[in-house]
Image (cartoon, grey):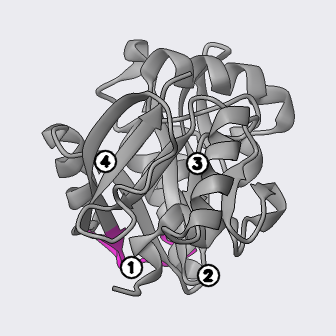
Amino acid sequence: MNHPLDRPAWNALTGRLKTFALGDAHAVRLDPALGVFLAAADDGAESRAALNDLALRYPGSGLVEREDGPMVDVLPEGPVASRAPCVQMVCSALKGGPQDARLGARLGADVGAMPLKPDDAAQMLALATLTKPGPFRARTHEMGGFIGVWRDGRLAAMAGQRLRLDGFTELSGVCTHPDFRGQGLADALSRQVVAGILARGEQAFLHAYDGHAATIRLYESLGFAVRTRVIYTVMAD
């Protein structure tokens, strides 16, 4: 197995996102102000030692590895808070229309989507904390391309990008405040973000918990298909 998405965290943090990474050639950790991801280069002694060191310094780290891959059980020492199976989904074309950026812009305009700015960080964190779309920290928005919809001065919904690898960018942080669900906001925002990724000549990908059938159906309706299964491991704080 040598597909870049088999090891998304390692390949992102040693590639396009290396400016956000802590560590060395043996193990890397996403800056904890931005997220939780941790990964080792291999299962050798030096890599395991570096992995342990980063996990100790930054509790609550998360590791994502292909379920049947050689690194799935290469974990830091210490207690594990949770291990959950997830599906990894990839999209190379949006369903329901052409995948160019103009389509996404029109869909976003229909719901009033606009780029989110650094001044919006507190509301973004509050929305993510309430809705729990996945790991989201005070500076996660710096990873790029977050857009949102405002209603009555409140951030009603948002979506953005997270891990970036050669040829692939992750759709992430998709969430809607409970007061504004059922309006198609997550669909429209996801389409706009994905359209921008595809317009750059990349493919979009994402991770969803295996048991969240409704979430998986939503992404399938956009044009995502399951590529493989991964295990998401969270170390104890």
- 146 over 224 or under it: above or below: above
Disc number lying in front (2 or 4): 4
Query: Which residue is painted at 69% across and 20% down in the image?
Result: 123
Task: Give the image location of residue 189, x and y in percent.
Answer: 48, 47
Task: Give the image location of residue 39, x and y in percent.
Answer: 56, 58
The residue type indicated by label 4 comes to: Ala
Q: Which residue is mark 4?
A: 208
C-alpha span from label 4 to label 1: 25 Å
Q: Which residue is mark 2?
A: 200
C-alpha span from label 4 to label 3: 16 Å
C-alpha span from label 1 to label 2: 14 Å
Q: Is residue 202 left or right of residue 35?
A: left
Q: Please say if the residues under marks 4 and 1 sit with CB atoms less than 8 Å apart.
A: no
Query: Which residue is painted at 55% across and 83% down in the image?
Result: 167
C-alpha span from label 2 to label 4: 24 Å
- Residue 37: mark in rendering: 3
Magenta-colored span: 90-103
Q: Please say if the residues under marks 1 and 2 sit with CB atoms less than 8 Å apart.
A: no
Label 1, secondary structure: give it. loop
Label 3, secondary structure: give it. loop
Instruction: Assess disc 1: are there few (<14), some (14-19) or many (≥20) residues with their C-alpha within 10 Å of its C-alpha.
Output: few
Q: Is residue 87 left or right of residue 191?
A: left
Dominant SS of magenta comes to loop
Disc number lying in front (4 or 1): 4
